[in-house]
Structures are given as structure tokens and as C-alpha cells.
Image: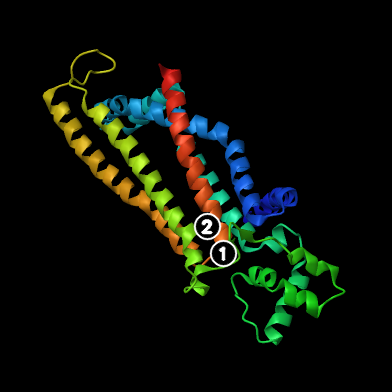
């Protein structure tokens, strides 16, 4: 599946590269286009998150009222989702799409000759063998990046092979070589610039998410009275106490979610140091666009509600 989508994305990235003749610019334009394509989904997700946050009190009342009747509880919860026109699986769909994109683009950036230039595997293996026979080090994970880096040597070795011209990708971007891997170039300070900016953008993104969650949580806690949705009467003290306990549990879940929100950036940062800078550039641009998207959509959804 990932190969399939990486192949499709490869056509788009190749088209953009032919327009700008620079791998870094092509990745930036590619990231912008992907964000534009997914914008309707992002808008829908933002609206769903807003509605879900407002549903919390209603959901807690239903959960306590029917806690001893699972069948009725599920029925009432589904009715609530239908009334509010929210799908309980929308968050799962978004997470699946994000994971699909992440892995597919990782495949694409790891193997640009396969997915961008559509070079046959047997040709790639042949050129890799030539490098190895000359005693040149070839990465097992990113052999195609090494081929691109050794383009001049391979062209000299095979002057009549027009297929090698596919390796002549312009990887220099603002003085940075996007084919470099930080782990292999520890003494070159330039390889840390993009990963460092990515770390900074991840921190900003996490802070924004946490601030929004805390703001909504604060709004929920401002509710002084809990009213039964069916009878319109104030709930009993016993149920209120249970609701309070539930809020404490939600606080614990929020803390867990906060910790989990750090996991993806930490994993990405770890990969960024062992992957070509082109991949880190994509993650950096994706973070920047995501921050802008959240700010704009949050204002747009808020204005629409008002």
C-alpha cells in the first residue's frame, strides 16, 4: 500500500521538480499542495473537535445515568452523535490518513530514483554494485541517496549510459545538501539546521495543542450545575460526586494524551538524524503549515459559530 501511494506522490514530486529544478523547492511545493488537498478534511476535523468538546458534559451525564445499562448507554451515545452530526470514527480516519502519508512520503524521499525517476530496480542494483566494487560505502537503508551523491563518478564510469542522468538531481537548497544524513556527517554543523528548526516547530505545535485542550477543559469545569438532559432537573449529589471523580479521571487522561503528543515528534526527530535532510525538510514544512492551518481554522470555525 505504501509503495502504491509513494509511486503516486512520486509523479507529483517529479512534476514539481521539473518546474523548479530544485529538490528542496519541489518538496516545499509538494507539502503545500498536499495540505491544500487535505484542507476539506482538516476543516471537518476542526469542526468535529469543537463540537466534541462541547459534547463532553452531555456525554458524562449519559455515561453516569446509564452506567448499569450498557445497551442503553451505547444507544444514547449513538443518538447523541447523530443529533450533533458527529462521527465517532472521524478521529480514527484522520490518524490513519496521517500515518499513511507519513510512511508513503518516507518511502518516496528514501528512494527518489524508484518513485520519482521510475528507475528499474535492476539498474539501481547494478550501479550500487559498481560503487561497492570500487570500495565506496553504500547505505543499506538509503542506497539511492548515495547514488545521487556519486552521480559524477558514475557518469564518468558509464559515459554512454543515459539512464544515469536521472540521478542528476539538484539537492542543494539554500546552501544545504538535502542528500546528507546527519548521522553520517556529525562534524558538519549544517546538517543540524533543519532538524533543529523541526524540533522548534514541534515544540510550538505541541504548546498550541496543549493550550487549546486546557482552555476547553477550563470551559467545561465552569459549569456550576449539571442538569439531567431528559427531565431538566438537577442531578443528585451522588451523581455530582461521581461526575467530579470522572473529571479527575479525565484530567489523568489529559496528562496521558499530553505525554503521547510528544511521542510522534520524538520519533520523528530520532528518524531525522538517521534520514536524508530532504525528509526532515518535509516534516519541518508540514509542521509550519500545520501551525498556520490551526490558527486560521480555529479563527474561521469560531467566527462561523458566532
Q: Quadrant of the N terminus?
A: bottom right
Residue 59 placement (x, y as % from top left): 31, 28
To which residue does mark 2 refer? 280
Q: Residue at x 44, y 33 (%)?
A: 295
Residue 44 vs residue 81: left or right? right
* Residue denoted by label 1: 276
Locate residue 265 relative to residue 101 in the image: left or right: left
Quarter location, residue 32: top right
**Where, by quadrant of the figure, is residue 205 drawn?**
top left
Residue 85 at least partly seen: yes
Q: Which mark is residue 292?
A: none
Q: Is residue 88 left or right of residue 153?
A: left
Looking at the image, residue 54 lies above or below residue 262: above
Instruction: Judge by depth and name the residue closer to the eye, 7 or 15.
Output: 15
* Front residue of 188 and 117: 188
Which quarter of the rendering shows the C terminus? top left
Amino acid at each position: 500500500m505504501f509503495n502504491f501511494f509513494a509511486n503516486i506522490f512520486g509523479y507529483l514530486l517529479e512534476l514539481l521538480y521539473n518546474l523548479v529544478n530544485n529538490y528542496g523547492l519541489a518538496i516545499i511545493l509538494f507539502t503545500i499542495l498536499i495540505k491544500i488537498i487535505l484542507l476539506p478534511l482538516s476543516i471537518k476535523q476542526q469542526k468535529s473537535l469543537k463540537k466534541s468538546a462541547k459534547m463532553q458534559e452531555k456525554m458524562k451525564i449519559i455515561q453516569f445515568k446509564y452506567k448499569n445499562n450498557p445497551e442503553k448507554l451505547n444507544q444514547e451515545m449513538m443518538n447523541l452523535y447523530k443529533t450533533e452530526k458527529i462521527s465517532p470514527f472521524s478521529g480514527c480516519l484522520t490518524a490513519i490518513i496521517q500515518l499513511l502519508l507519513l510512511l508513503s512520503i518516507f518511502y518516496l524521499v528514501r528512494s527518489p530514483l524508484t518513485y520519482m525517476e521510475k528507475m528499474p530496480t535492476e539498474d539501481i542494483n547494478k550501479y550500487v554494485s559498481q560503487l561497492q566494487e570500487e570500495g565506496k560505502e553504500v547505505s543499506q537503508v538509503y542506497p539511492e541517496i548515495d547514488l545521487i551523491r556519486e552521480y559524477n563518478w558514475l557518469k564518468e564510469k558509464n559515459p554512454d549510459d543515459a539512464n544515469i542522468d536521472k540521478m542528476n538531481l539538484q539537492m542543494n537548497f539554500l546552501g544545504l545538501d538535502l542528500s546528507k544524513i546527519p548521522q553520517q556527517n556529525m562534524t558538519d554543523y549544517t546538517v543540524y539546521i533543519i532538524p533543529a528548526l523541526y524540533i522548534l516547530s514541534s515544540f510550538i505545535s505541541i504548546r498550541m495543542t496543549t493550550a487549546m485542550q486546557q482552555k476547553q477543559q477550563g470551559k467545561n469545569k465552569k459549569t456550576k450545575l449539571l442538569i439531567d438532559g431528559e427531565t431538566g432537573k438537577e442531578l443528585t449529589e451522588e451523581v455530582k460526586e461521581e461526575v467530579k471523580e470522572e473529571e479527575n479521571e479525565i484530567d489523568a487522561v489529559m496528562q496521558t494524551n499530553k505525554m503521547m503528543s510528544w511521542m510522534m515528534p520524538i520519533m520523528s526527530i530520532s528518524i531525522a538524524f538517521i534520514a536524508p535532510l530532504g525528509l526532515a525538510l518535509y516534516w519541518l514544512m508540514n509542521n509550519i503549515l500545520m501551525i498556520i492551518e490551526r490558527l486560521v481554522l480555529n479563527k474561521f470555525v469560531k467566527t462561523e459559530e458566532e
